[in-house]
Amino acid sequence: MSNKLRNNFVKIFLLLVMLNVALTLKAFEPEADDFENTFQYNLYQSWLKKGDFKTNFPAGFGNKKIVKSFTDKNGRSVQVEYDWINRKITDQRESLPVIFFVEDFSKIKPFLNFLEGFIYRLNTVDYNFLQEYCDLEKIQIEFNGYTGAEALNLLWESSRTKRTEIKPLELEVKDNILTFYLPIKSGKTIKFEFPVEYDIAKALQSIRRKEEEKSIPIIEDKRDDIVEKKIIPDYQIPVRKRTPEPDIELLPEISSLTLSDYVKSYYALRQSKELLHNKISDPVDFLLAEFPQREIREEGDIISILAPKYLDDFSCEINVNLVQDNDGINFTPALNYELNDKTVKIGNNEEIVMNALNYDEIEAIAPFIVQLVYEHRAIGSKLLNFLVIHDDIPTTLIMRNGERKVFELNSYANLLLMLGNYWQSHNVYFKIQEVTKKNGNIELQTYLIAYDKDETAADMAEIMFHLDEEFKIDMIMMVLHQGNDRIDN
């Protein structure tokens, strides 16, 4: 690779690393009919008013919740979680940082949800949202030397004209009492005490019922000029007109499109996996045809697809198991990884550090990590048809090439197959940059580079995977950056 090529690529890569700074896309701005009832909608409006928030910030969509980031007037990031059922927002919380560790975070998560809901309601302009949220007969609240209702009133008065910002929470467990300390950035601390046996999940359900009783359902206007039916594989849902639907019958040829135009034209088209099991006579010849610039190495039933790393940091190595039976040939990810302390080693000395996780968590997600890596590196080849999974995970795709545009897809597999059709003449490099935990949930920060085989241009993506309490992906966000500039060798 020439120095000019390397230097230009490094500049583009630095842009990729900074993508998260530029996510100011109008991704999701809830309107009245996005909420289950008027109480939730008014709660949202009151919270926006207190923080003087703009709403044009990106959101990530999962099966049971939406995560949306806001920026306050001082440039600080505020992350909010919205619970949603049947595509309606049913509750709202501000995400709070924690600095404590517990073996089973699932037991603490409902208490944390309660505290995050409390801070969200504290940061509204209407005391009514906060007043009946706490059952002060079961929960002890203390603030500035006062307890109970007096502490709640004092806290509200001290927060009336400005938002309350919380530093990382601390937890103390003693004498069957859970004590949470919520340090305020102004210097004071809110203290909550819960009996260990307190059924906080049931209490949250009771709170939600009381809030529903004070509300009325929101009825959507189903006039044709307001709501349309958007066809999605296997089912239909009503969606307000926001993005024009492409005319599937008039789709242009892929070869004539930029990546951005391709995504815009094809994102709503259902992609299908090609069934190749009975069409392959020689597995090695098949892989050589799909990866003509790679070395194919066999060792028993494991086949390795090898090539040099890119910039000594990005690998495209794929290791698969060859399975031959009466139904034909199948390839599966080779799960021959090693665990060394808190590092997962795969393939040819590739290491993924997971210091943020405990050992049980690492053992639980290690096989999935290997699958994820090889699945992405197979994009652009027919091997992807064997390795692709994640068929039903809602995905937010943010396309950037000067302008920014958001697409919401119901299947991550559909997105990978779509990109695979466009990147057929590319080498795809993929790495897991960082594995972190936030509020007890694991998040993976990853990078993908699709470099054309002439090494003249690269498209790049930053992909965030959010895992639920059962270590299953429940939310994906991809920021896709088109390589506009052609780079001369």
Image: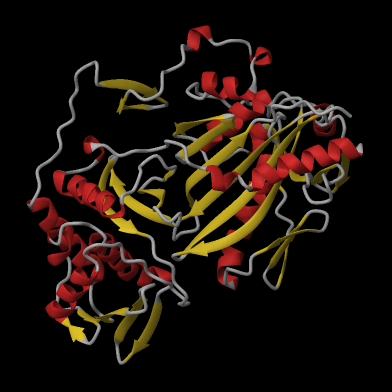
359 vs 122: above or below: below
User: Considering depth in this image, is 360 or 219 the residue closer to the camera?
Assistant: 219
Q: Is residue 203 left or right of residue 107?
A: left
245 vs 34: above or below: above
32 vs 75: above or below: above
User: Considering depth in this image, is 468 or 303 the residue closer to the camera?
Assistant: 468
Tell me where residue 430 appears, x and y as whole percent: 70, 45
- Quadrant where the C terminus is found in the figure: top right
Residue at 66%, 53% (x, y): give it.
432
Residue 203 visible to the viewer:
yes
Q: Is residue 29 left or right of residue 469?
A: left
Tell me where residue 87 appears, x and y as whole percent: 30, 39
**In the image as oriented, which residue stretches furthest toward the right?**
2
**In the image as oriented, which residue stretches furthest toward the bottom?**
175
- Quadrant where the N terminus is found in the figure: top right
Q: Is residue 227 left or right of residue 13?
A: left
Residue 112 lies in what quarter of the image? bottom left
Residue at 28%, 49% (x, y): give it.
48
Residue at 51%, 25% (x, y): give it.
267
Tell me where residue 169 appears, x and y as whole percent: 40, 74
Q: Is residue 70 left or right of residue 12?
A: left
Residue 429 visible to the viewer:
no
Tell me where residue 482 appears, x and y as whole percent: 65, 30
Q: How many marks?
A: 0
446 vs 231: above or below: below
User: Considering depth in this image, is 416 or 301 the residue closer to the camera?
Assistant: 416
